[in-house]
Amino acid sequence: MSSPTKVTQDGAVLEIVLDRPPANAIDLATSYALYGAFKRLNEVDELRVGIITGGDNDKKIFSAGWDLKAVAAGEGRSEEEGFDLGPGGIGGLTEYWDLYKPVIAAVNGLAVGGGFELALGADIIVASDDAEFFLPEMQRGFLPDGGAIQKLHHRIPYNVAMDLMFTGRRMGAAEAKHWGLVRDVVPREGVMDRAREIARTIAAGAPLVTRALKEFMRHNAHGSPEAAHAATRRAWIGKSGLAHYEAMMFSEDFNEGAQAFAEKRKPDFQGQ
């Protein structure tokens, strides 16, 4: 049986392709495979950024979301555990709270239900001009609770998020960019090139900073400015509880950045 994912490394960038024809639907085995790829990104020091995209298929689908045929067959259901989406949630990303390296979603087609939620698990989304995002769960008897009801209203206006979830309507790439959900909309053949361009830019920065940024925002993005500023002050004295932020502040790379600026040279970040 072929693997539902294809994973390749290009320098500091890990490219993850969801490759499960005909619609890149995610069953439990696929979710585990994707989690394994994101775990590799998280744990291999030389890797700085991940890209998730959908394998090419005639239907032009990034991902059709959770495999409803598997659901109908009872896959993942447990009286003790509830519904099992695998480690890291659907697609191995939506609930991977310890993943502190940036992920770019290169959405190259339809992002349906859990496929939309998988994209929401990324830090940056780029989309092909024929991409569409929609959540048909309500019409199928359940909520999009693999990530949409938890995150979508933080990414786009509340009323727009509610409209998408209530109606299941399709949101095109241009509208997604209008609301700020998508960074760039490009022709289908250029979506991975754009994602790689962004990834290389991020990878050229200080690796401890990207981890610190994700950690800080995860804990403070939706709190008050007062609480967020207080967290930064506690970090300076090693009492914030933000391990990656504090590691960055007391690192050799922190000094290297300032020294390189003073000496008018490119910094040589070592990740320590």
Image (spheres, grey):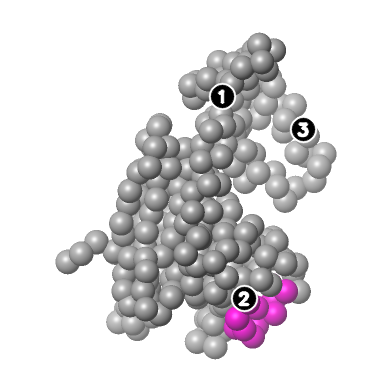
Considering only vertical position in the picture, is 94 above or below 77? above
Which one is closest to the eye, mark 3 or mark 2?
2
Disc 3 target residue: 230
Magenta includes 161?
yes
Considering only vertical position in the picture, is 248 above or below 211? above
Considering only vertical position in the picture, is 55 above or below 230? below
Determine contact: label 3, label 2, CB under 8 Å.
no
Q: Nearer the viewer, residue 96 or 255?
A: 255
Q: Amino acid at mark 3?
A: Ala
Instruction: Give the label on residue 172, or none.
Output: 2
Who comes first in sequence, dot 2 or dot 1?
A: 2
- Residue 187: x %, y % from top left: 54, 66
Which quarter of the rendering shows the N terminus? bottom left
**Image quadrant assignment for residue 226:** top right
Q: Amino acid at mark 2?
A: Gly
Q: Is residue 255 left or right of residue 72?
A: right
Who comes first in sequence, dot 3 or dot 2?
A: 2
Which one is closest to the eye, mark 1 or mark 3?
1
- Residue 28: x %, y % from top left: 33, 66
Name the residue furthest left.
Answer: 1
Disc 1 target residue: 247
Q: Which residues are magenta?
A: 160-171
